[in-house]
Amino acid sequence: MRLAQDGRVAEVEALEDRAGAARDIVALNAGAALCVAGRAASVGAGVDLARKVLASGAARAKLDTFAEATRRLAARQGAHRTG
């Protein structure tokens, strides 16, 4: 369980644009994905774009939106099972 908690903390720190290895890994992975998807001309350009998104807070906001949608869906499914 501790490893999962550590991973969650690292994920949040990266999405909050806190300097460190987690943010660098997220930026590199996102940069490569943006390049492969044709959204960036190179991995380096994708990393630059990813860093801008992290710095803007948009990535964290998207995670929060996704988490809230997941909670609502789980609550609805739980109501269907008990009702």
Image (tube, grey):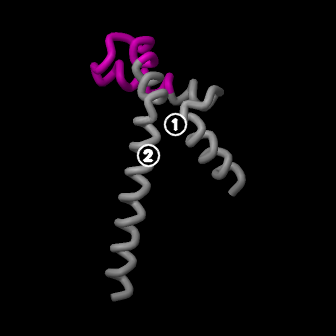
Label whose residue precedes the other's in the sequence (2 or 1) = 1
Q: Give the residue displayed 64% in from the left and 51% down from the top.
A: 4
Q: Give the residue displayed 54% in from the left and 36% down from the top.
A: 16
| x and y percentages locating residue 50 in the rendered image | 43, 24
Q: Give the residue displayed 37% in from the left and 66% down from the top.
A: 72
Question: Label 2, on which residue?
Answer: 63
Question: Label 1, on which residue?
Answer: 15
Residue 21 shown left or right of residue 67 in the figure: right
Residue, far left? 38
Q: Quadrant of the N terminus?
A: bottom right
Residue, far bottom? 83
| x and y percentages locating residue 9 in the rendered image | 63, 45
Please tell me whether residue 41 belongs to the stretch shown in magenta.
Answer: yes
Amino acid of disc 2? Leu
Q: CA distance from mark 2 to mark 1?
A: 8 Å
| x and y percentages locating residue 3 in the rendered image | 69, 49
- The range drawn in magenta is 27-48
Q: Give the residue displayed 32% in from the left and 81% down from the top.
A: 80
